[in-house]
């Protein structure tokens, strides 16, 4: 996976290294250049001092001992001179048994020349005329201390540069993390949206995220609108067909058809199938509501109403109970869940002796709905059968069977699982496992 | 420079005559260079190597080339890292350390 963080870091490091090295090298060059200029001035001064030190003695020219600096007398001191006359050459005592390489042009010599004891010499050449003679004076200074300090500056600079680079990378990391914070918030909001806790994303986000959030909100609104429209269209179609269908049903029972009982039977069967198919498709269309944002079923708000209705319908002193974790919200459409629970509870109430219980719980991978009664129950070997037959029956004969058809449709639409078992109350237990939204989507 | 060297020479002669009474002559840098070129003596830099090994990173304070009874000897003074001044005598032909004592 490509990481934006890594890409940013690499770019930053590359830019900083290139710019840093260029800058450091340029600074170093300027630093050394100015040092050399200083040395040149000093060496020129030394050369001029040597001219001053030249005096006429009893045997021609000589260097006045008092005017000569002590560094010229100590062997290998690091300060040397060489004076070339037309016929002879004078060397400073400091050179001792080594020589100073002459240069070819006046001024500071380009490179460094090798001196005694591994010294690197920076040499200045001055051309003068004195006592009617042309003379060339070379003055050289040991450059190694400066080279050493330049090297030190380089090492220290490199260390500081690396330190700064590290610091910048750490800071950049935290800045990027902070910059991506709002994105994480938006992700959480999308998850909440899926859970049905939100209707749309908060649009109070950084400018860079605004288009994205706006687009998602727009998509949500669009999906909702499309869904509503297609539902309406199906509903309208259903209602539009209901009247002609009723007319047809009515017609099929007319006396004219009594003479043809076989025809009437076939007609009735076909009409019934149309009717059933129609109602199932209408239901299914409604179940598509899973994609609706903000759809949820608040247990504490909805269940008391449902239970009091059931109590009213089955008015025979049944004890109806439900329990669910406080504040449990099931992330599915309210109508669909009411239909699902209503069907199953109604069934349980029909068969129960005295007690019906509903338990809702939330696990790590989804929700668990258990409906139990203390009725006769169903034998273990027949349960699977009933589950399947119930559907078949339901498909063929409306209002009969266990009313499991619609339940199965709903559970299937949500990617859930339904199973029958024996209740601790003695009767049948219907257990429905609904995966949480994200899992359900993944499973598809 | 010749004059200079001669003054040195005179001073050296005088000093040696007074202290040792033996014949010894100080040679100047031009003679040293000539003798080195002729191969009579080794370069000072090379001769100092054993001494520098004995006193690492010592500084050369002074070096004199002396001719004592036809033997060329370097008399050098080293400032050791500990700040002590050592006086050494080296054979100018092969660098043997002839004498190594604390300066007095």
Image (cartoon, coloured by chain):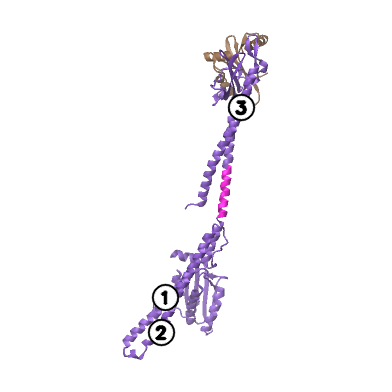
Mark 2 element type: helix
Percent of width and height locating residue A82: 58, 18
- The residue lying toward the viewer, choosing from A1 and A328, is A1
**Quadrant housing residue A443:** bottom left
Give whichever of discs 1 and 2 has the lower sequence position. 2
Residue B35 drawn above or below residue A253:
above
The circle on residue A358 is: none
Q: Colour of chain B?
A: brown
The residue pinned by badge 1 equals A281
Q: Which chain is purple?
A: A
| C-alpha gap between disc 1 and disc 2 | 18 Å
> The numbered mark 2 sits on a residue in which chain?
A
Q: What residue does disc 2 label?
A: A246
Query: Viewed as shown, does residue A226 lie left or right of B48?
Result: left
Tell me the distance, in whole angstroms, between the alpha carbons under discs 2 and 3: 115 Å
Residue at figure coordinates x 52%, y 51% from the top left: A5
Numbered mark located on residue A39 in the image:
3
Toward the viewer: A439 or A213? Answer: A213
Numbered range of the magenta stretch: A163-179
Q: Is residue A30 visible?
A: yes
The 10 Å Cα crowd at callout 3, few under 14, some 14 to 19, many 20 or more, is some
* Residue A105, quarter of picture: top right
């Amino acid at each position: 996976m490509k990481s934006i963080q890594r890409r940013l870091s690499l770019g930053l490091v590359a830019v900083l290294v290139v710019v840093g090295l260029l800058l450091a090298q340029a600074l170093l060059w300027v630093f050394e250049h100015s040092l050399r200029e200083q040395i040149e001035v000093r060496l020129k001064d030394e050369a001029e001092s040597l001219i001053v030190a030249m005096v006429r003695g009893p045997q021609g020219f000589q260097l006045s001992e008092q005017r000569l600096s002590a560094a010229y007398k100590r062997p290998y001191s690091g300060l040397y001179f060489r004076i070339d006359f037309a016929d002879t050459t004078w060397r400073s005592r400091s050179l001792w048994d080594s020589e100073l390489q002459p240069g070819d042009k006046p001024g500071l010599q380009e490179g460094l020349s090798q001196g005694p004891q591994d010294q690197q010499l920076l040499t200045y050449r001055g051309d003068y005329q004195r006592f009617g003679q042309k003379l060339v004076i070379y003055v050289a200074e040991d450059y190694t201390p400066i080279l050493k300090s330049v090297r030190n500056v380089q090492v220290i600079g490199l260390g500081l540069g690396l330190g700064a680079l590290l610091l910048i990378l750490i800071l950049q990391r935290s800045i990027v993390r902070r910059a991506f914070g709002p994105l994480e918030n938006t992700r959480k909001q999308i998850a909440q949206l899926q859970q049905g806790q939100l209707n749309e994303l908060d649009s109070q986000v950084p400018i860079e995220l605004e288009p994205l959030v706006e687009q998602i909100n727009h998509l949500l609104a669009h999906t909702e609108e499309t869904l509503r429209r297609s539902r309406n269209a199906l509903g309208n179609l259903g209602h539009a067909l209901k009247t002609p269908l009723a007319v047809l049903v009515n017609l099929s029972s007319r006396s004219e058809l009594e003479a043809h009982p076989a025809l009437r039977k076939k007609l009735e069967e076909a009409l019934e199938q149309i009717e059933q198919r129609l109602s199932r498709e209408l239901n299914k269309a409604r179940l598509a509501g899973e994609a609706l944002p903000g759809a949820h079923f608040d247990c504490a708000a909805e269940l008391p109403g449902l239970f009091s209705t059931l109590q009213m319908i089955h008015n025979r002193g049944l004890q109806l109970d439900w329990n669910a974790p406080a504040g449990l919200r099931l992330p599915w459409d309210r109508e669909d869940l009411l239909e699902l629970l209503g069907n199953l509870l109604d069934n349980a109430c029909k068969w129960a002796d005295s007690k019906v219980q509903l338990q809702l719980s939330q696990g790590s991978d989804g929700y668990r709905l258990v409906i139990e009664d203390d009725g006769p129950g169903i034998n273990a070997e027949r349960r699977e059968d009933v589950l399947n037959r119930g559907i078949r029956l339901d498909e063929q004969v409306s209002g009969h069977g266990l009313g499991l058809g619609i339940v199965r449709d709903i559970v299937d639409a949500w990617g859930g699982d339904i199973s029958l078992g024996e209740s601790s109350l003695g009767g049948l237990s219907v257990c429905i496992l609904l995966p949480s939204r994200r899992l359900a989507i993944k499973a598809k | 420079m010749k004059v200079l060297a001669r003054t040195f020479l005179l001073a050296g002669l005088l000093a040696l005559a007074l202290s040792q009474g033996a014949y010894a002559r100080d040679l100047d840098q031009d003679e040293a260079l000539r003798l080195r070129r002729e191969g009579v003596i080794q370069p000072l830099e090379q001769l100092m190597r054993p001494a520098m090994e004995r006193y690492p990173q010592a500084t050369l304070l002074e070096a004199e080339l002396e001719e004592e009874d036809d033997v060329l000897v370097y008399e050098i003074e080293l400032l050791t890292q500990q700040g002590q001044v050592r006086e050494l005598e080296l054979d100018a032909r092969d660098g043997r350390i002839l004498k190594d004592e604390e300066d007095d």
